[in-house]
Image (tube, grey):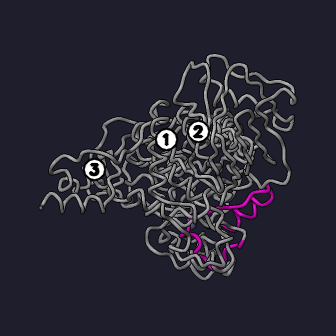
Amino acid sequence: MNIIPKPKKAIEKSGRFTLSASTGYYMDTAFAAQAPFLNSLIGKSLQTPPAACAQNDAAVKFLKDETLPEDGYRLSVAANAITAYAADRGGILYAMQTLRQLFDADLHTGVESLTAPCCEIEDAPRYKWRGMMLDSSRHFWDVAAVKRYLDLMFRNKINVFHWHLTDDQGWRIEIKKYPLLTEIGSKRKDTEIHGWKSLDMEGKPYGGFYTQEEVREIVRYADARNIMVVPEIDMPAHFAAAMAAYNWLGCREIPCEVHWFFGGFVPKHMNWPDWNRSACAGKETTYEFVFNVLDEMAELFPAPYFHIGGDEAPKDEWKKCPECQKRMADNGLKNVDELQGYFNNRVAEHLKKKGKRLIVWNEALKANNLDKSVIGQYWTPQRDRYAEKYVNGGGEMILSKHQAFYFDMYYAQYPLTNTYKFEPAKVGVKEEAQNRILGVEGELWTEFIGEQEKLELNTHPRMEALAEVAWTPKEKRDFKDFMARMHHEEKALEKLGVNYAVDEVAIPKGLISRLRTERMFYTCDQHVEMRRNREYRAKQSE
Ligand code: ACM
Ligand code: ZN
């Protein structure tokens, strides 16, 4: 059975169920709001979709069973009847999604009937946090593109959309109290292309932002698919777009520009020594600004979490700033790391009043004074003993290790197995701390991804691999078995017009040696595993 992510327990039986226009279905009243999904996921493939009917007449039933776990479901497909049970909305939607794959609904259009193999499935996720991040700052993805991304997340039973809305290269959400954030902060004069430090420029200005009405629409769309939207406003660093709009947010009130280059590198000839700065953590006006922004956003995003980044924050300016120094002295803060801890704690405290917990990237965990309610997100490629200490010492964590979950990287550098074979123990999380791992999340940074095709190429089949890490019991995971199911899934992606990286390709002579140059990797559309490259190279030289 070609189900991704692989269910916890699934037994295939002999025989098949046939779905046609004459099949009646019944949906428990508790799931009435989910009923329209049945035809948008499966019925759309039939000339005439099945119709709702009374429970006694229904061959397909969706019923409530309070005893099932969160997002779990039980599904029985017999030759003459289908019964699905779930305790909640997520579970019933996921039962439908599994049926969509069992019927191969996306491979057909306008047919009289579809069939699915008889089976018994008992399914539930391993982790509650099954996330995908999208960077809408470096490149802007319009409402239609975001919805498409959410559709593909739902297809893989992924339930957290981490939305990176601001960075040095653009502020992308309308904040009514601070109109310059979008008037100035959403626009940049140019865009670096061709990879880190290339200094090649696209040669035209870039901009875009979401209105609050559009944000509401996306949050509703996600919610209907059991997806929670967790916004991120990156601070105190990665904050140049905000400081370009309101330069009083910085320690020194000097001019600031929205960045048009990427990757923490500005060549000397640009003569801009002050490009990499953090917001001032001393002035009370910074806190007022942050709280006002969070207050507006809390109205738009009902999720009980809020991400404030906190990564890669330079602190040299804080060491010289009288306001920052006074803040440290007044609060007995021993160093600038603790000043960031103080900043984060104040934000966490403010969010707590709104029923939200703070999430930060792992660098921010270095502060000794950080409130234990803060959730860390471990991304750094290098080992971070502070992050390991945080989770092993009682803190909660989301795992997004660079080598496994940075989907902006090319496959030649991070092969698919890096994602598929990921386990928390690999990044220093002790066995007894593993219940504090909320889950895993894939990161789609978009510095060098500006088109949907490239976005999808980098995302699939990695999103599917991540889904299996997040959902399937560890002992059920097998890469070869996954790839076999993935090759079937590719047919559905093709029908849906979704781009993906392929692995079974004829490698032209000489490609492997050319692949050694980074520029080539960026345009390479294959997840040729490195081991296979080496094998291939050995064969070539025989
Ligand atoms: C990050 O990649 N700086 C979170
Ligand atoms: Zn300062």
Q: Mark 2 points at which residue?
A: 101
Q: What residue type is labelled 3?
A: Leu
The residue beneath circle 3 is 199
Please report the residue visible at 34 percent of the width from the left and 35 percent of the height from the top.
204
Q: Residues within 10 Å of mark 2 (few under 14, many from 20)?
A: many
Q: Position of residue 267 (x, y in %)?
A: 29, 57
Q: Tell me which label, 3 or 1, sits earlier in the chain.
A: 3
User: Element type at marker 2?
Assistant: helix
Ligand 2: which quarter?
bottom right
Q: Is residue 350 magenta?
A: yes
Label 3 Cα neighbours within 10 Å, binned few <14 / some 14-19 / many ≥20? some
- Please say if the residues under marks 1 and 2 sit with CB atoms less than 8 Å apart: yes
- In this rendering, the label closer to the viewer, 3 or 1: 1
Q: Give the range drawn in magenta.
A: 344-372
Q: In this view, does 89 lie above or below 406?
A: above
Q: Where is residue 525 in the image (x, y as percent from the top left)?
A: 33, 44
Camera sees residue 290: yes
